[in-house]
Amino acid sequence: DAGVTQSPTHLIKTRGQHVTLRCSPISGHKSVSWYQQVLGQGPQFIFQYYEKEERGRGNFPDRFSARQFPNYSSELNVNALLLGDSALYLCASSLEVGVKNIQYFGAGTRLSVL
Amino acid sequence: AQTVTQSQPEMSVQEAETVTLSCTYDTSENNYYLFWYKQPPSRQMILVIRQEAYKQQNATENRFSVNFQKAAKSFSLKISDSQLGDTAMYFCAFMNPGGSQGNLIFGKGTKLSVKP
């Protein structure tokens, strides 16, 4: 079975632009979470979606938004890009939400903002 | 708020030897999960091992085991018989049990190098 897939793998944007990152969860998984990993740091939680509804949001500005589609895939959108948005964006999927559900990660999208 | 601290930015070990990575955390919750994830240069986070806080017994997965000290809020990872393929960043993570959420809180990571 395919794991969590993310596209694109690399992306270069300039300040002020908008970006959309995509994630396909493991087949059968209904929950998707997004994390931002700045170089040299651990991942930070951005959003969690379950059954197309937002179930959690981290401490990120409103420039960050996301959605989940009926097939459980997800998009992360970032508007008005800043240099500080340069990071590895990780998507993780799990069967359900909650403490007992293991999150499986994709290989991430490396975003560079110039 | 929960926090996770990894005090060793980098460590190295000789192939076939044993190494222990440290992690401490802070929480007022009584029931939670702790994880160790491995991130090789390929970038993909791979689950190494997880521990349920209400279980006294330390989790083990082949060459990987943990020393979970709930009262001390300590969760260290022991890698036995280290292999070159163990070279990676290792992240300790705490699962936030609040409500219906299940987001992970990560430490800053420890870079492990296994030397031949």
Image (cartoon, coloured by chain):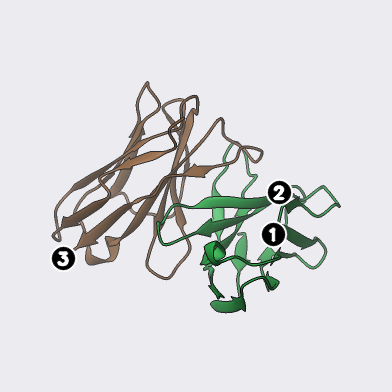
Chain colours: A brown, B green
Question: Given the image, what chain letter belongs to the residue carrying mark 2?
Answer: B
Q: Residue at x 77, y 52 (%)?
A: B59
Q: Which mark is residue B27?
A: 1
1 and 2 marks in contact (CB < 8 Å): yes
Residue A68: quadrant of the picture: top left
Q: Secondary structure at mark 2?
A: loop
**Amino acid type assigned to the residue bearing label 1 in the image:** Thr
Direction from residue A67 to residue A78 in the image, left or right: left
**Amino acid type assigned to the residue bearing label 2 in the image:** Tyr
**Mark earlier in primary sequence (1, 2):** 1
Foreground: disc 1 or disc 2: 2
Q: CA distance from mark 1 to mark 2?
A: 9 Å
- Find disc 2 in the rendering and name its residue: B32
Between B46 and B22, the residue placed more toward the observer is B46
Tell how many labels.
3
Q: Residue at x 67, y 70 (%)?
A: B16
**Amino acid type assigned to the residue bearing label 3 in the image:** Leu
Q: Secondary structure at mark 3?
A: loop
Crowd band around label 2 with a 10 angstrom C-alpha radius: few (<14), some (14–19), many (20+): some
Question: What x and y, as percent, mark residue B58?
Answer: 81, 55
* Marks 2 and 3 belong to one chain: no
* Marks 1 and 3 belong to one chain: no
- Find disc 3 in the rendering and name its residue: A114
Direction from residue B27 to residue B44 in the image, left or right: left
Between A73 and B89, the residue placed more toward the observer is B89
For residue B23, above or below residue A20 = below
Q: Is residue B8 visible?
A: no
